[in-house]
Amino acid sequence: MTTYSGGCHCGKVAYDVEGTIDQAIDCNCSMCQRRGGLLWFVPRGNFTLKTDPAELGTYHFNKHSIDHHFCKSCGIASFSQGQMPDGTKMTAINVRCLEGIDLKSVKVVPVDGRSF
């Protein structure tokens, strides 16, 4: 398992996340399509926010079941949090916001999020 550091553009949101990036989801829902994120899902226990949670803004849409977090200062949406249908708490990491990632080496899987 590898530990990655990530966060927003200005540095007011920073985190560490542990895991192996085997793929990233390219979702076409109304939010992801506009934001351009590539999502990697990890169990919530593998995610550690290193900065003050007060720096996070949160946006909800559709079923209001996912906390789409963004930096209140620079606006970058580097992660979201929610849960799987079985109740497992997950964090969706925007792989584009991780340090030292070669995006050409990440398998990108398209997902039809519009149909959810």
Image (tube, rainbow, N blue to C red):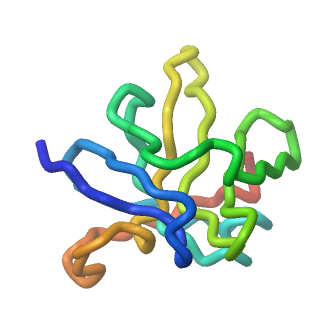
Residue at left offset 60%, top offset 77%: 36
- Report x, y in % for residue 34: 73, 77
Residue at left offset 25%, top offset 84%: 104
The quarter of the displayed image where residue 1 is located:
top left
Residue at left offset 19%, top offset 77%: 105
Compared to residue 23, the image places residue 116 above or below, namely above
Front in this rendered view, residue 90 or 75:
75
Compared to residue 55, the image places residue 87 above or below, namely above
Residue at left offset 56%, top offset 63%: 12
- Report x, y in % for residue 33: 69, 74
Q: Residue furthest bottom?
A: 104
- Report x, y in % for residue 72: 74, 63
Give the side of residue 116 with respect to residue 11, left or right. Answer: right
Give the side of residue 3 with respect to residue 110, left or right. Answer: left
Give the side of residue 24 with respect to residue 113, left or right. Answer: left
Give the side of residue 86 with respect to residue 41, left or right. Answer: right
The quarter of the displayed image where residue 63 is located:
top right
How many numbered marks have been drawn onto this rendered protein structure? 0
